Image (cartoon, rainbow, N blue to C red):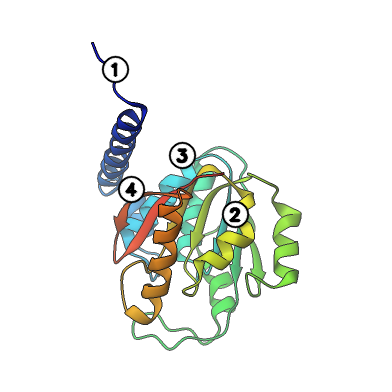
Amino acid sequence: MLSQPDSTRANSAHTNQILELMYRLMEYRDQEIRHRLAKVASMLHLDVLLLIYHFAKCGTGNILEIGPYIGGSTIAAAIGARESGKAKKIISIEIGGRLKHVRIPSRNIFKDLKKNLARFGVLEDVTLINGSSFDAATTSAVREKLGRGDVGLFIFDADNNVRRDLDCYGDLLSNDCWVVIDDYFGPEPKTGPLRAQVDEFVSAGRLLPFGYYGWGTWAGQWQRK
């Protein structure tokens, strides 16, 4: 019997992982966690919140988030981390300010972020950093909490420059770290540059895609060199 080439076996295993992830998401839609997360105000689709919950609960390592806005993704991650039964650090970076939005506006983003985390009982589970992700003070604060390969879930929902933050924090991500990047699809001014950057990482073998969820959120894994 001829054995399958390594690349064929790898592709088959990856396909099975993608199907397994889709199946788990279908299961969560009928579980109590769906009703809990449906009460969370978020720019992200409920399916994406469920995925973040799953990655935080079932994955290994700590959690680094950039751009939580008022905390929907942070709450999902914190609940998942708590239900994992393991101690996990959650670092969330938010620059703050205000946003006029038809559905979920905020006059003081960082204040509303803290308020929402407190409302869902997870404020004490999260280390919040009010600043730009690439400022020296921010990177220093993050690296005081996290070391090389410590991060098992990376969430990005900030501007259109995910490359900047993956270049900055990529060494903190473990191999096969789950990565969630919002706005892969959507209005071109933001999604065009971001999608091009994600595609470049995929082509270079640094990101492994697992699909697109909700309103255009990319999900996959980080591949260390």
Whichever of labels 2 and 1 marks the residue nearer the N terminus, that label is 1
Q: Position of residue 104 (x, y in %)?
A: 39, 80
Dot label at residue 3 = 1
The answer to whether marks 1 and 3 mark residues whose Cβ atoms lie closer than 8 Å is: no
Label 3 SS: helix
- To which quarter of the image does residue 23 belong? top left
Left/right placement of residue 151 relative to residue 201 reads: right
Question: Which residue is denoted by mark 3 in the rendering?
Answer: 58
Whichever of labels 1 and 3 marks the residue nearer the N terminus, that label is 1
* Residue at the image position 47 percent from the left and 68 percent from the top: 157
C-alpha separation, residue under disc 2 versus residue under disc 1: 36 Å
Question: Which residue is denoted by mark 4 in the rendering?
Answer: 32
The answer to whether marks 3 and 2 mark residues whose Cβ atoms lie closer than 8 Å is: no
The answer to whether marks 1 and 4 mark residues whose Cβ atoms lie closer than 8 Å is: no
Whichever of labels 4 and 3 marks the residue nearer the N terminus, that label is 4
| Label 1 crowd (10 A; few <14 / some 14-19 / many >=20) | few
Label 2 SS: helix
Judged by depth in the image, the label closer to the viewer, 1 or 4, is 1
C-alpha separation, residue under disc 4 versus residue under disc 2: 34 Å
**Residue type of the residue flagged with mark 3:** Cys
Whichever of labels 3 and 2 marks the residue nearer the N terminus, that label is 3
* Residue at the image position 29 percent from the left and 66 percent from the top: 215
Q: The C terminus lies in which quarter of the figure? A: top right
Whichever of labels 1 and 4 marks the residue nearer the N terminus, that label is 1
**Residue type of the residue flagged with mark 2:** Gly
Dot label at residue 115 = none
C-alpha separation, residue under disc 1 versus residue under disc 3: 32 Å
Compared to residue 131, the image places residue 80 above or below, namely: above
C-alpha separation, residue under disc 1 versus residue under disc 4: 44 Å
Left/right placement of residue 191 relative to residue 92 reads: left
| Label 4 crowd (10 A; few <14 / some 14-19 / many >=20) | few
